[in-house]
Amino acid sequence: MKTHYLLIDYENVQPKSLQRLQRMQGMSLKVCAFLGTKQAKVPIELAHQLQPLGSNAEYIQICGNGANALDFPFAFTIGELSKTDPDGVFPVISKDTGFDPLIQFAKGRGFEVIRHKDIADIALPKPVREKSRSKKPRSEKIATIVQNLTPAARLAPGRSRRSRARSTRYFKSARPAQNLRNC
């Protein structure tokens, strides 16, 4: 199963709810929430919703100021994660179109990176259902199998005696094994 590394540009997008994460918990999921320098406090709603993920949720506080202060650590983190897990999926939650060249570059290198404007935009994989080949109920299927079994009375008489005689003759003619110890 591929690990999904959900990268949230919290300086740019403040999701109202992360309830969608609860539906993603069946997947292998890790969340990185990037916080700008002006975001000294984490909203309690965000903390409550990320807390059940335990060590799979991480807050990354950016130290510098400037137009792209958060973008470079964000890009660096995508690079680190893609190097350690090249098969991972990297959904980026941001309205910042400045990430698009990075995403196109990563896609060109074979990585699965996509930008979404909101967590609600992430397409969740559909649960896999087992398809039944037949519309018959299970009890009818079992009844058909039992009905097709050959009853013991129909077996040709003497077959078991013949096979027993063959195996007895074979083993009597075989030489005794040498160098075997009795255990």
Image (tube, helix red, strand yellow):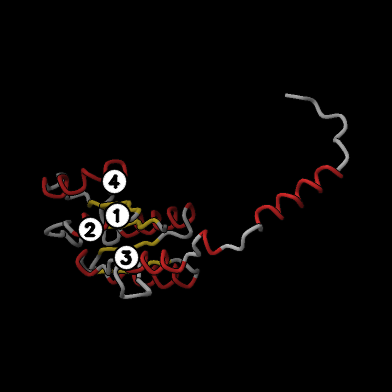
Residue 18 is left or right of residue 101, and the answer is left
User: Residue 183 occupies which quadrant of the picture?
Assistant: top right
In the rendered structure, are the residues bearing label 2 and label 1 in contact, judged by CB atoms less than 8 Å apart?
yes
| Depth order, front residue of 23/170 | 170
* Residue type of the residue flagged with mark 3: Arg
Which residue is depicted at the point 27% across and 41% down? 54
Q: Which amino acid type corresponds to the residue marked 1 in the rendered image?
A: Gly
Distance from disc 1 to disc 3, alpha carbons, whole Å, reads: 29 Å
Q: Residue at x 32, y 63 (%)?
A: 91
Q: Earlier in the sequence, mark 1 or mark 3?
A: 1
Q: Earlier in the sequence, mark 2 or mark 4?
A: 2
Residue 153 circle label: none
* Residue 58 marker: 4
Comes first in the chain, label 4 or label 3: 4
Q: Nearer the viewer, mark 2 or mark 4?
A: 2
Q: Which residue is mark 3?
A: 138
Say whether marks 1 and 3 touch (CB < 8 Å). Answer: no
In the rendered image, which residue does mark 1 sit on?
26
Q: Is residue 170 left or right of residue 69?
A: right
Q: Residue 110, position in %: x, y?
A: 49, 69
Amino acid residing under circle 2 = Arg
Give the residue at mark 2: 23
Q: CA distance from mark 2 to mark 4?
A: 19 Å
